[in-house]
Amino acid sequence: SEARKFLESLHLQPQAEPQDCIRVNLPENQMTRVAISPQMKIDDLIKKVCRKRGLSDSNYIIRIMNSSVELALDTSVEMLGDMELELY
């Protein structure tokens, strides 16, 4: 059909895989959501959250909510599943 030929002529690229969002609890009982990709590292997550909230990323870590378990900076977000996280 003409419509199909037209669409093929546009040479459209497949869309990138959609990004998921992750919820991160912040100091003072605040919360934010940021877009992530599965291969994103904790270091990049900290930078992204801090940039969004105007904070200095060198002052914070990410840990599992209500615990003292600090996540290593090279941990990939996909390994976290649905754990609740906090910027600390």
Image (tube, grey):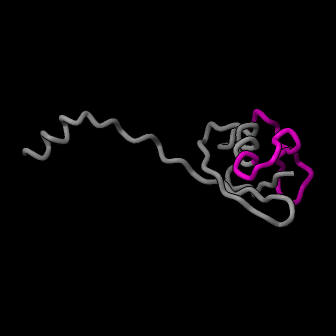
Q: Position of residue 45 (x, y in %)?
A: 71, 43
Which of the two residues, 26 or 41, is positioned nearer the viewer here? Answer: 26
Q: Is residue 13 above or below residue 88?
A: above
Segment tinted magenta in the rendering: 50-75
Q: From the viewer's perspective, is 19 left or right of 88? A: left
Where in the figure is residue 88, as x and y percent of width and height?
87, 51
Residue positioned 85% across, 38% down in the render: 58
Q: Would you identify the image quadrant in which residue 39 lies?
A: top right
Name the quarter where the N terminus is drawn.
top left
Quarter of the view holding residue 5:
top left
Asked whether residue 59 is drawn in magenta, I would say yes
Q: Is residue 42 left or right of residue 60?
A: left
Residue plotted at (44% across, 40% down): 16
Residue 7: say if magenta: no
Please name whichever residue, 71 or 86, is drawn nearer the observer in this view of the structure. Answer: 86
Determine the residue located farthest toward the right in the rendered image: 68
Image side of residue 68 versus residue 18, left or right: right
